[in-house]
């Protein structure tokens, strides 16, 4: 066994720095995603939670720092190597990102047909199993525009696990869901993580929902990890960032007002600049 | 002072980006050719669905050409040469150029919008995360289908313009030009090199329109405004490129 295989950490982020132009998103972030666990990444909107998933998936490149997946530095791989690595990852996009010209069945079959080389009959059985797991076998012949947003995410989930990856990343899976869909998705994510032995990263700002299923959580804000620990530890955190986030306070370390170059009084001409 | 420099540097940057993108498409073509089903699907979307506009436009342009040509030739007592005028105008110029302009408006804009929307809805990013190269899976089959469809559409346009639904209908059936003279003039005056030149123009225009369309779509900003701009840019840039390339190609062919 390699040291990577025996390591409890599947994804290791060290000294991550990333910016969009002059806007710094991450300023020296360290994270460990434990193998076989469901880890939540929490934080207010715009803190770069989705960015983190794209960095882990190698779609974007950090300005500094490293991201290792199973002992391999994601950003040192050539394109071919990166694509091989991605076969071991699944990413559930916020809106599902289903291919609109394919049926539900063909969407789930897509990665299998592209990569597995399996005969069509076997692919059919695997797809039906995955769709059964997310409760949508009956919707196999429908097109993405014929299903609801919650169903689209479940199809995307079936597609994400089609190649039986080690890691599944969920980008805001609960946003805009009605209570029934939300409950279904929560139960699915939790069940699949346990029954398939997956490692899961759930990025969300739906605190109560995510903490109820997560094994571990990181709270990210202001370009840094503000706190991390078990859900109980996060709820008991004394960090003002974490407390503002958990309580939904409009002002605090995360300011209500977006920083402006000039004061309000100056803008209104009440005082000389 | 800085603004012109910025415009020039921006143009050069996009030109370089588009050139690299073109080479990436070329590199993906062998893999795309191994999956003919994807190309056939796109041939239907790009080629077959463009047929209606090509056929109707070819007919009307042929009829207008016959009307105008007949009026002018009659002044010189040469109405019998209508076939020569029509066939040269259509095969050498109007066939490839008008087809390419219509192709840019119908298929080019659709290509740019489709790929731009796929980008805006994370479908391309989703493919990348499934370890599927979108250039190989999405762009290359569409580029190839457009490359094959353009000369076929130009040929259909030319046949419609010259034939029974276009110039022949107007010139022979309506205006009374002799049927035998019309066809024999065409037969005697049209040389294989005219057809080859027309084919070369169609292939060059098709390559240009497809390249511009897939580039604009693939590099569109992932917003509704971005997709709209990509679609508009495809039609505008393609149209200008077709006319400029037509001048260059015609100048070379005229010299040779």
Image: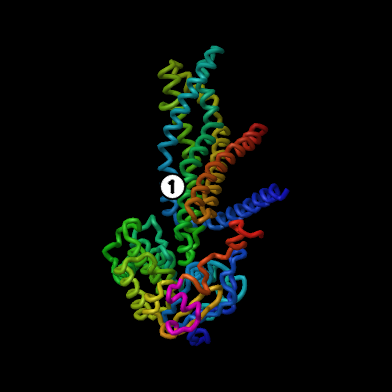
Task: Residue B67: give x, y in percent of width and height.
Answer: 48, 20
Task: Residue A104: give x, y in percent of width and height.
Answer: 34, 61
Is residue B172 positioned above or below B227 on the image? above
* Residue at 58% over, 53% down: B22
Magenta-highlighted residues: A234-249
Task: Residue A177: give x, y in percent of width and height.
Answer: 35, 66
The quadrant of the rendering that contains the C terminus of chain A is bottom right
Magenta region, mostly helix, strand or loop? Answer: helix
Q: Farthest front residue?
A: A270
Is residue B33 in sight in this rendering?
no
Q: Tell me how many marks there are.
A: 1
* Residue at 42% over, 34% down: B55
Is residue A27 in sight in this rendering?
yes
Task: Residue A258: give x, y in percent of width and height.
Answer: 54, 65
Element class at badge 1: helix
* Residue at 55% over, 73% down: A222
Which image quadrant is residue A185 in?
Answer: bottom left
Q: Farthest left residue?
A: A138
Which image quadrant is residue A146 in?
Answer: bottom left
């Amino acid at each position: 066994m390699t040291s990577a295989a025996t390591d409890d950490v599947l994804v290791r982020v060290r000294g991550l720095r990333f910016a969009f132009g002059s806007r710094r998103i991450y300023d020296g972030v360290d994270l460990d995603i434990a193998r076989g666990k469901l880890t939540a990444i929490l934080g207010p909107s715009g803190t770069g939670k989705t960015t983190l998933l794209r960095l882990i998936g190698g779609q974007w490149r950090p300005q500094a720092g490293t991201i290792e997946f199973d002992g391999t530095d994601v950003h040192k791989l050539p394109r071919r190597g990166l694509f091989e690595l991605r076969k071991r990852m699944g990413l559930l996009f916020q809106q599902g990102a289903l291919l609109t010209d394919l049926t539900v069945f063909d969407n789930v079959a897509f990665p299998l047909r592209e990569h597995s080389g399996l005969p069509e009959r076997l692919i059919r059985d695997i797809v039906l199993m995955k769709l059964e797991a997310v409760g949508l076998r009956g919707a196999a012949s429908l097109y993405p525009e014929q299903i609801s947003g919650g169903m689209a995410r479940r199809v995307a989930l079936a597609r994400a696990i089609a190649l039986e990856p080690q890691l599944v990343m969920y980008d805001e899976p609960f946003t805009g869901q009605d209570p029934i869909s939300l409950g279904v998705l929560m139960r699915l994510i939790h069940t699949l993580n346990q029954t398939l032995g997956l490692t899961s990263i759930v990025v969300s700002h739906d605190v109560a929902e995510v903490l109820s299923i997560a094994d571990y959580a990181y709270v990210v804000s202001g370009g840094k990890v503000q706190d991390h620990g078990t859900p109980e530890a996060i709820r008991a955190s004394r960090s003002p960032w974490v407390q503002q986030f958990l309580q939904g306070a409009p002002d605090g370390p995360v300011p209500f007002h977006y920083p402006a170059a000039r004061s309000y009084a100056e803008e209104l001409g009440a005082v000389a600049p | 002072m800085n603004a012109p420099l910025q415009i020039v540097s921006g143009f050069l940057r996009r030109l370089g980006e588009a050139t690299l993108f073109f080479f990436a498409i070329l590199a993906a073509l062998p893999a795309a050719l191994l999956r003919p089903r994807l190309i056939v699907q796109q041939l239907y979307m790009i080629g077959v669905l463009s047929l209606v506009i090509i056929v109707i436009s070819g007919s009307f342009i042929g009829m207008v050409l016959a009307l105008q040509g007949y009026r002018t030739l009659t002044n010189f007592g040469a109405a019998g040469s209508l076939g020569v005028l029509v066939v040269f105008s259509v095969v050498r110029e109007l066939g490839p150029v008008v087809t390419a302009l219509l192709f840019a408006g119908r298929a080019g804009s659709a290509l740019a919008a489709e790929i731009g929307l796929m980008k805006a809805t994370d479908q391309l990013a989703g493919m990348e995360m499934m370890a599927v190269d979108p250039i190989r899976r999405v762009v290359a089959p569409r580029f190839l289908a457009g490359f094959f469809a353009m000369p076929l559409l130009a040929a259909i346009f030319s046949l419609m313009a010259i034939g029974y639904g276009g110039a022949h209908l107007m010139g022979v059936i309506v205006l009374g030009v002799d049927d035998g003279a019309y066809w024999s003039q065409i037969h005697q005056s049209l040389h294989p090199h005219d057809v080859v030149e027309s084919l070369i123009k169609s292939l060059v225009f098709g390559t240009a329109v497809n390249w511009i369309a897939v580039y604009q779509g693939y590099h569109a900003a992932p917003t509704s405004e971005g997709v709209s701009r990509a679609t508009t840019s495809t039609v505008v840039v393609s149209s200008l490129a077709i006319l400029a390339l037509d001048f260059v190609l015609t100048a070379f062919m005229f010299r040779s």
